[in-house]
Amino acid sequence: MKTILILRHAKSSWDNLSIADHDRPLNKRGKRDAPRMGQLIRDEEILPDLIISSTAKRAAATAKAVAHACNYEGEIEYNHSFYHADADTFLDRISSLQGEHKIVMVVSHNPGVEELLEVLTGLWERMPTAALAQVDLSIAKWSELDEAEGSLKNLWIPKSLNY
């Protein structure tokens, strides 16, 4: 079995409208919520073997804060194609993975993360900022991803967490 964790970046700042979209940082709420999602990952014992993040500043900052909070020790892979990606872009990258990764986390943006969740599970779910979906797949290798029908095991939203 393989698991994909789909994480929408935490809340970003709109304080400076002259900043390019790609360069928008996290706001106060985003800086609070990202580590909370990392703590959730640690508490749920779903530590990823690999984190792949959009290169956008808000996504990269989310990935770093989550990685730190869940005690992820690997390198974060930054993938420019994950910035405003569609489901096929995510699926192409994940299905090309080699090795023994059991849990892969994707950190990116809407509408792509919602589309990825729908393609993997057949369910459409709203994913507000810093929402985390856990999708379990009954596959042995990532190359089998195209034939997989995933199961939405959990969907966590920061405002519903008790910490």
Image (spheres, rainbow, N blue to C red):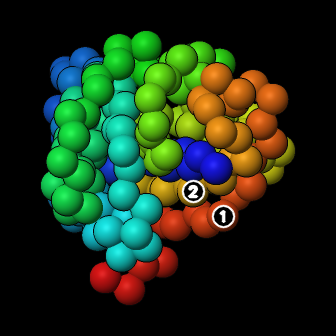
Three-letter code, disc 1? Lys
Image position of 162 with respect to 23: above or below: below
Q: Secondary structure at mark 1?
A: strand
> SS at mark 2?
strand
Residue 141, can we see it? yes
Viewer-side residue, 90 vs 34: 90
- What residue is disc 1 on? 153
The residue under label 2 is 134
Badge 1 local density, few (<14 within 10 Å), some, or many (20+)? Answer: few
At a point 29% along the width and 26% down the height, the residue shown is 77
Q: CA distance from mark 1 to mark 2?
A: 6 Å
Lower position in the chain sequence, tag 1 or tag 2:
2
Amino acid found under the numbered disc labelled 2: Gln
Where residue 48 appears, as percent x and y from the top left, is: 38, 50
Drawn side of residue 110 relative to residue 42, left or right:
right
- Above or below residue 50? Residue 150 is below
Q: Would you place residue 124 above or below residue 148 in this image?
A: below
Pointers 1 and 2 in contact (C-beta within 8 Å):
yes
What residue sits 61% from the left and 66% below the top? Answer: 154
On residue 89, which mark appears?
A: none
Residue 119 occupies quadrant = top right
- Is any atom of residue 17 visible in this view? no
